[in-house]
Image (cartoon, rainbow, N blue to C red):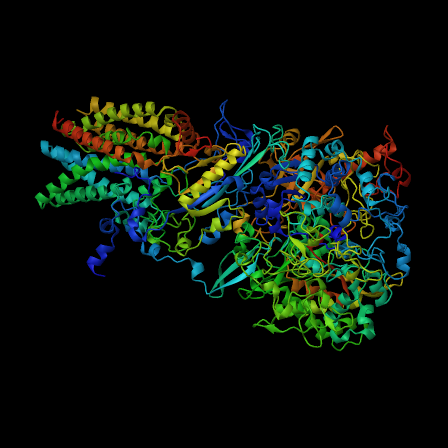
Amino acid sequence: MSVVETKRPDGWESYGDAQKERVGFFTDTSVCIGCKACEVACKEWNLIPEDGRVWTGESYDHTSQLGANTWRHVAFVEQRKPLQALLEAPPAPGDRTAPSAAPGGDGSTALRWLMESDVCKHCTHAACLDVCPTGSLFRTEFGTVVVQQDICNGCGYCVPACPFGVLDKRHLPATTDPPPAILGRKEDGRVWKCTLCYDRLKGGHEPACAKACPTKSIQFGPLEELRERADARLAKLSAEGWNGAQLYGRDPEDGVGGFGAFFLLLDDPEVYGLPPDPVVTTRDLPEMWSNMLAAAGAMLAGVAALTLFGSRR
Amino acid sequence: MREELHPLSDVNGKPPGTTSWDGSITEAGTEMRSYYGRPVIKEPVWTWEIPAYFFTGGLAGASAVLSTAAKLTGNEPLSKRALYIGAVADLVSPALLISDLGRPERFHHMLRVVKITSPMNVGSWVLLVSGGASNTAAVLELLGRLKPVKLLAGAVSSLAGPLLATYTGVLIADTAVPVWHEGRRELPWIFGASAMASAGAAASVFLRPEDAGPARRLAVAGVLAEGALMQLMEVRLGKIGEVYRQGAAGKLSWAAKGLATGGAALLARRGKRSRAALVLGGAMVCAGEMCLRWAVFKAGLQSARDPKYVVEPQRERADRRGTKATTKPDA
Amino acid sequence: MSLSKLLESWPAVRQLREGDPLGLGRAVQSPRSRTLVPRIDEAEHVVQSVCPFCAVGCGQLVYVSDGAITHIEGDPASPISRGRLCPKGQASKSYADSPLREYKVKYRRPYGTSWEELSLGDAMEMIADRIIRTRADSWEWKTEDGNPANRTMAIGNLGGATLDNEENYLIKKLMTALGVVQVENQARI
Amino acid sequence: MPSLGTSFGRGGATTFQQDLQNADCIVIMGSNMAENHPVGFQWVMEARERGAQVIHVDPRFTRTSAMATKHVPLRAGSDIAFLGGIANYILQNDLYFREYVEHYTNAPVIINDEFADTEDLDGLFSGWDPEEGEYSVESWMYDGMEIHGSAGQREQGFKPTKGEASGHGGHGGGLLHGEPPAEDRAMQHPRCVLQLLKRHYARYTPEFVAETCGCSVEDFVQVCETLVANSGRDRTSAFVYAVGWTQHTVGVQTIRSAAIIQQLLGNIGRPGGGIMALRGHASIQGSTDIPTLYNILPGYLPMPHTESYGDLDRYIEANTSPTGWWGHFRAYFVSLMKAYFGENANADNDFLFKSLPRIDDDNSAYWTVEQMLQGKVKGYIIAGENPAVGHANGKAHRLGLSRLEWLVVRDVVEIESASFWYDSPEVESGELEPEAIPTEIFFLPAATHTEKDGSFTNTQRLLQWHWQAVEPKEDCRSELWFYFHLGRLIKQKLADSEDERDKLIKALRWEYPTHSGIQEPDAEAVLQEISGQEIESGKFLSGYPELKDDGSTLCGCWIYSGCFKEGINQTARKKPHWEQDTYVADEWAWAWPDNRHLLYNRASADPDGKPWSERKRYVWWDAGEGKWTGLDSPDFEEDKPPSYVPPKDAKAEDAIAGDHPFVMQADGRSWLYVPQGLEDGPLPTHYEPHESPFGNRLYSQRANPRRQQNKDLAEDPYNPVADEPGADVYPYVVTTYRLTEHHTAGGMTRSVPYLAELQPQMFCEVHPDLARDVGLEHGGWATIYTSRSAIEARVMVTDRMRPVRMDGREVHQIGLPYHWGKRGLITGDSANDLAHMALDPNVHIQETKAFTCGIRPGRRPRGADLPRFVAELREQARSRLEASVAEPPMSGRTSRTPSAPGGRREEDPHVEPEEARKPAQ
């Protein structure tokens, strides 16, 4: 199996002529104002149910995490550290425009408030896609990963397969397409996640969250272009001495083959609730299959041996 | 639905390992960074049917082999009983799986595709083949007709059986759940051993001592193998293996060990003579195997729930070997 | 559908026929996915509007089908907002369709303990009568100092910053003609 | 706002949001723009990405601070000290933009020698009348001007322009000619404005600012340096403010402070400069331009005052400025009367001027509530506002509503102002019983913006049309429908009335075409009336220069004149910005006045008409063409050359010189010093908030002497303050604010599921030290109390709230969002229940951004225990105060007269005039 050896999204090339340019998101948290327009835009467009009204005390985040009913989630992290580190070199002579000290550089009162709009990563090698037993999850012609709601039977396998905890089963009462009563389930029961607005893409429209984003923290576009943009952005921020600036999921060599929706973070991923070194679980599947065949063989042999040899009593 | 994972009254009391107001985790001197202690990955949404299926699937798979092997040695009582046990388990298994689905009426979508990347899809096909074969064999056995077909069905089911019994180990290992994924080498073996133990023990319950030798040996060997493999896995899991000693998984592990070992001892020492020992020992081993499956299941849920089992190993790995997940300016 | 057609539509078969052996892409695409159309492309008409919340004045596009709003999103043509909206503006449709929205007149009689039903026409008549009565009862030609007043101080009107200019215009015009001077709005707040 | 109006000539924001991208430095203060105007904030981010410094000065570290290149924490209510400090820094170091200041501002003007500054009179300006508690403004005037005594003015039948009316310019000012009588171009005369400013601010040193505002000297100086470095010929800086500045008893003077800085730095009328006022509601600017305000008529024409009992000529004379565009006041007013009354208003009947209702000094919303509480108001109509939650002292408002005879509430959901009779906190406490409330209530469901045509005027004076998308359902109706049909019904019912008082309503021109099944009035027809027409021909006017004073034109709002020019709805123009030539995008909608986006843009060129620099070119004189040209419609007569010198007898705009860009001002200049139009002084002065834990470091006059207080209103008691005994019952500073996820009083958002879940509960923000000291638990509950009421909130412990040090004391500040009420998908206590109704004297706005409170852990008492709890604390504070009066404190410096009943203290200068006038130090 070659699922992780290619740098191209699995399944994408099956489209032949119908294949489109791979698109995605670049979420630049250095300009995110935490307004949550993305969360609402997503819900309005995708007609997602309300996700409960729980005051968490976790800064301004009361959505808490991605899930079946939240496909964009804005994280808020309050930190006692400056946004920009003190620059080593003083401002160039004659540059009267720069402040005398870097923002928050005095250390004592330094404070920063990180905000990050999280979303499905649309991995190049997507575990959810691989493990889905029905083909409900599929790679679209745009290289994105989508759950087909007319197919999903709610087996839930993709839920623990995702290394980012993106997918979840909707436990709310079904609103449309109710299952026959004889089978008893009252809940929606299907798994939902970001579709990168598959329907909008088909109509040539930008995904709802990216369109709404007031500061263009969420940028939508061809992935290659976004990666270039991100590299330039990282270089700029690093030159300006921004604390902890790093790209997350930009590198096609990472454990999931690079994200279709990647990020510029201002601290390590785990601070935002993201795994620091995610790996697509199916990378180990070939090994697991052969290991299993060995176990099955051993078991066959074992049962046979224990039955064939030895006394009947 | 989102929930208040850490009831704030607890947060205020600051029990170990919960969030403080600034999101830092305070845990007995260590500081693990996470997002307010919230899980990184999602806990599996599977309900009780799934661990139950692990048991019935294993039972069915091993019983099919046992039945055929017994037939080869001419142990007809064992062969028949194993056949029927396997067939029943093969009938219960899909019912359990369907019951767990969010959309049970769409169970047949499982056969929409053939996906080698999806252990669950592969398993569905295996279960179809194995269950179909074992039930065909059982029905023909009951009716006493079409013997060649019956034999063929029996052979098919005994070849598919080991796959059915072990693929569930891959099924859960092929997730991001730390304690499952990191146990990927042992899990199919443990499930195979557990299946052997279950099949042997279940057959023992229905056998007279004079026919129960192979079944008892199977049960005892399965229990011994599984115990050793579990030990090996826990050691190899390192820190994350601690979930097998904590909470529900811990209790179930102990119960599994106690019941399976006790049952196996009973079968080994008294099973030769006592029908009662066979029944009791067999039941104990089965119960033990059931507990084992539940322990593995619960351990998975527990390790998914606590971000440290996700973050710490990955952070350690990233710090040790570097990671391509993040691109830093100087890189 | 013939059996062969049925078989051909079976994704497991399509996997082999459509170059998607792993069943990850095109072969498993459902008919619904294949023919999906965004509902904004199906709207009967689109109306250019302005966000009703703060004073930034973001442009909105309101999509309508069957006499109902199907979606509201930012108007890219606006030089101010360039198609973007904040969470409130983005929730405009939900605001217009709020589960708490009232559609009927409610009437509470003096000392009453519950709302009662009332027709809009009756309500309008009753309100007009009360204005006329209160105004007549409280009319002031002069102040205590004997200065001209030409007013009633027993009626007030509050609100305006969320309303249209045309509406504010009619309010001020009508109230001034009625001698009502206590006309105020949120600008004060 | 009169602050911008008196300084520059118009009350609107001087610039537009897109222009912020051109700024080299943006100071956001009194605004949390990223949270409350997120989409407008994109232009600040554009500037930041281009290298601009973004400075946020705010008591709280907000989402705006998170995006700023610099956040400076500030003690709530100390803004004038901070801004005054900047002005002082500029003046002491001679860093002002000399050429700009000399030519475009009134810095060289010499002021009356009777003028005395707060520095001379320990916190009072000359002219204070302790009896009336008001200033008389003669001594503030320009030297050599003929002064009408204000009492004398009244005898002649008019009052000077002030409040919102002066929000549209320093008209009048007594100038008979465009040029001030006496000035010193060298700006060295001791009584010239520049020198007065220098002296006035001399004590606002960085150390004073740091001590008073609770920031560091370094932070403050850094702000000054950054601002100065980014202003001048090549660079410009902008100020952005919102209600963080207005909601104070010194709100107008705070904005004035920024106006002074921006004048000194030469940042007005230039790209990337200006003062951006951010309004909170879709059409709050519109509802001031076409006012639903008591004291003005459309276009900032003053409502006739009861003391203005003269005839039309007197009224016109009082409000006309001989010079500048206010010289055509008669045309504006007469055209309005023609729009209102048609042929019933004519020259023979003084255009019905004498029949118009008259106002008193204050008939504002808070005054009305007082009247309600006294049973004097019988009927009230509320349309799209929720005073029970959104106004300061919600309890007083709810009690007021319960004393009405009838009440009409129009809204899309049943708001607290409609439901107070059965679910208010007062019903819960037993203070109100439904069976005992006489108010007859009509709740009428309203239409939303998608269900009607109409225009909003946004924060940058831009009128934008929104088209109807769907028909309103069932009983839902637009306000246009409601008021039109209400007026129609009333006119019908009074058609046969012979009563003199019905003359005006019978004369009202009230014919508008209607459409659709519900007979919705045609909004465009109303807009046409607003824009104006020639009566005879029906020709649409192209702008206010076409208005006539003889009754031959009609115009519903002169500053909006031209918004329907050529019969085209200019406000509905929607040409995409990418099809337009410049970022000004002047073919998108229509900005007043005359589609100008950046006001006073003549100032973007030097006195000779050349751009100050290439980098900052905007509007300039094209000598070849003989006209002003550039990126925007010039805010100047197009063909008036820079060299124009008005002849001696010139009138109106002809009296404005070619190098004076502020065409609404009588002298064509911006006003650093405001001789007339403001109630509380010609210059901003640091006063403490009405309720503050501190005394005034500068003067014994602690708070704004002119602020409005409700001394006799039992429903609005005040906390003891500063070092008064009893002040320690309410030792903390509280400031209220909004969140991105909700809108104002929450009526529009608590009812929306997607928004309700994003901020589901009322909370308070406190610093970890305060939490520790008081025993508040993060995530637990706190009870916050003032003399008015007590509320409960979830506790959010956060570094983002900072304590401030002053006088060696550390004082904590508590943040409270004010979106919650009893109704909606999410409910909670209302922060405004805690606030008092002391007001800014110019605009009657309440001080909800800085007052005092107490806090303790746990939920608030329920039922009747709540008012008891509040009363007990009030009693506790009062008894301490009384005890201290019986036994005077050791230090006499701040001894004060005991309080009146209700625990209120009196410290007004007319109570203690001697002490108040003690020289400083």
Residue plotted at (30% across, 43% down):
B97
Q: Can residue A93 be seen in this view?
A: yes
Q: Is residue B92 visible?
A: no
The residue lying toward the viewer, choosing from B33 and D540, is D540
Residue D684 on image: x %, y %: 78, 44
Residue D352, by quadrant, is bottom right
Residue plotted at (18% across, 26% down):
B217
Say if D808 sits above or below D614 in the image: above
The residue lying toward the viewer, choosing from D659 and D799, is D659
Say if D468 sits above or below D848 in the image: below
In-image side of D203 versus D492 (left or right): right
In-image side of C172 versus D758 (left or right): right
Residue plotted at (20% across, 38% down):
B86
Residue B284 on image: x %, y %: 27, 29
Residue D679 on image: x %, y %: 81, 50
Quarter of the figure with the C terminus of chain D: top right
